[in-house]
Image (tube, rainbow, N blue to C red):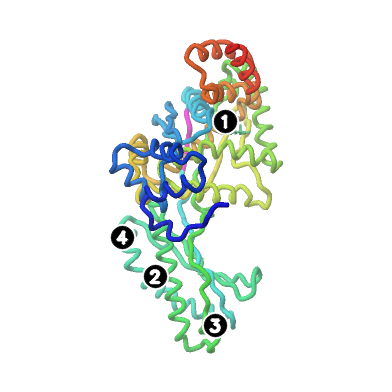
Amino acid sequence: MNKPIAGFSKLSKEEKINWIAEEYFSTPSAAIALLKNYWNTDEKIQKLHDEFIENTITNFYIPLGVAPNFLINGKYSTIPMAIEESSVVAAASKSAKFWSTRGGFKATVINTEKIGQVHFIYTGDVSKLDLFFVQNKAKFFNDTESITKNMQKRGGGILDIVLKDKTNLLPNYYQLHATFETKDSMGANFINSCLEQFAKTLKEEASTYELFTTSEKDITVIMSILSNYVPNCIVRAEVSCPVEELAEKHILNPQDFAERFVQAVQIAEVEPFRAVTHNKGIMNGIDAVVLATGNDFRAVEAGIHAYAAKSGQYSSLSHAKIENGIFTFWLEIPLALGTVGGLTSLHPLVKLSLEMLKKPSAKELMEVVAVAGLAQNFAALRSLTTTGIQDGHMKMHLNNILNQFEANDDERILIRKHFKNNAVSHSAVVEFIDNLRK
Ligand code: MEV
């Protein structure tokens, strides 16, 4: 049985690795060698990565790929994507190329409001709390001035604070629900600092508020935290073209294709099992760009899925229609992104990705990310409604199988040649390799 350890975080990196290797691996030296093999040879870069988190023992690689030829609002971009799934970058690139000759992608940021809440318990007369809030609202703004000063210079700050009575959900539960504009930063630190000051002001002012009884003065703040659900921080991405222009190699009958495509989207709109997979395809594009640009993909995921369920039933994030012979495909998603602060000025590859995107504002990055999601969804639905997904997917996955079996160069040539015209499946490739090696 493995032993627990006290004071692990105080050990040096070398000591941590040695302990793990001894404790968990049958050949400790091999584990140590592997971990060290992934250290960056540039000590400065390695130290930077070591310090992103606690207890770093090595780096975990994910490929950074690029999808070129994205025509967005009339300008070409090459989109950086950090992702491990074989077919994602290829699919994005194919979509980009397809739409570049059909008017490109149009993207618009609809609004950019962020949200944060102080959750608290107040036991007493609601009308007195209402009056207290009205009389003290300015104080919440004043007390956060030192935090908001710089953000205000950039055109952002606290937009509003409202008191919300949530006692229909939980006894004595109220919120200070605040909205923020955080310009080019994602704003998590800014919002949370403001909220923690609101909580302090709330407690202090309540404790001396004359109209409150002793128990009413004793407000309990449960927590102060931003919300990753940002339904008023929305970006829209769209493609459209006359139906007949959809024709290409796999789309011989564009009207039939457009109709099947719209039906596929409608299925995802009404059927949650399909909606989840449909949206997962969208997230393939979104997460990859969010990660490459140093943004918080967990926050983005949580917020987007909540948005997909906003009607009470989980549904498709994208929509499609054919009207007057025009095929239109679009999505609207909430995205809280930053192009300053956080990892954006720290991680060398994040800086490189942002430079590749011509140092976008947060709004411009929202547009790029939404487009990547739409492109990915288009590629998936195009395959699903025509050739099926496995054809392209398995062709891309072939490399992984070849690597797994450590195929040599000659074997790779023969295998690729064979599977150009034969369906790739894991067992078919294994059988082919076995026969080659006999
Ligand atoms: C695979 O990563 C994503 C898809 O399943 C998305 C979809 O089904 O729409 C192909």
Q: Secondary structure beneath disc 2?
A: helix
Q: Position of residue 225 (x, y in %)?
A: 48, 63
Ligand 1: does it lie within 8 Å of the C-beta at label 3?
Answer: no
Q: Relative to residue 250, is residue 71 depicted above or below?
A: below
Specify whether residue 345 is in view: no
**First-in-chain label (1 vs 3):** 3
Q: Are marks 2 and 4 in contact (CB under 8 Å)?
A: no
Q: Hey, what amino acid is under mark 2?
A: Phe
Is-magenta flag for residue 150? no
Q: Which residues are magenta?
A: 104-108
SS for callout 3? helix
Ligand 1 has an atom within 8 Å of the beta carbon of the residue at disc 2: no
| Nearer to us in this view, 374 or 407 | 407
- Give the label, 1 or 3, closer to the camera: 1
Q: Nearer the viewer, residue 406 or 17?
A: 17
Q: Mark 1 and mark 3: span between their CA atoms?
A: 54 Å
User: Who comes first in sequence, dot 2 or dot 1?
Assistant: 2
Q: Point out the tag, 3 or 4, that comes first from the N-terminus.
A: 3
The residue singled out by tag 1 in the image is 378
**Secondary element at image label 1:** helix
Mark 3, residue position: 128
Q: Quadrant of residue 38?
A: top left
Residue hosting label 4 = 150
**Element assignment for label 4:** helix
Say which residue appears at 41% left-offset and 53% top-offset: 54
- Where is ligand 1, by quadrant? top right
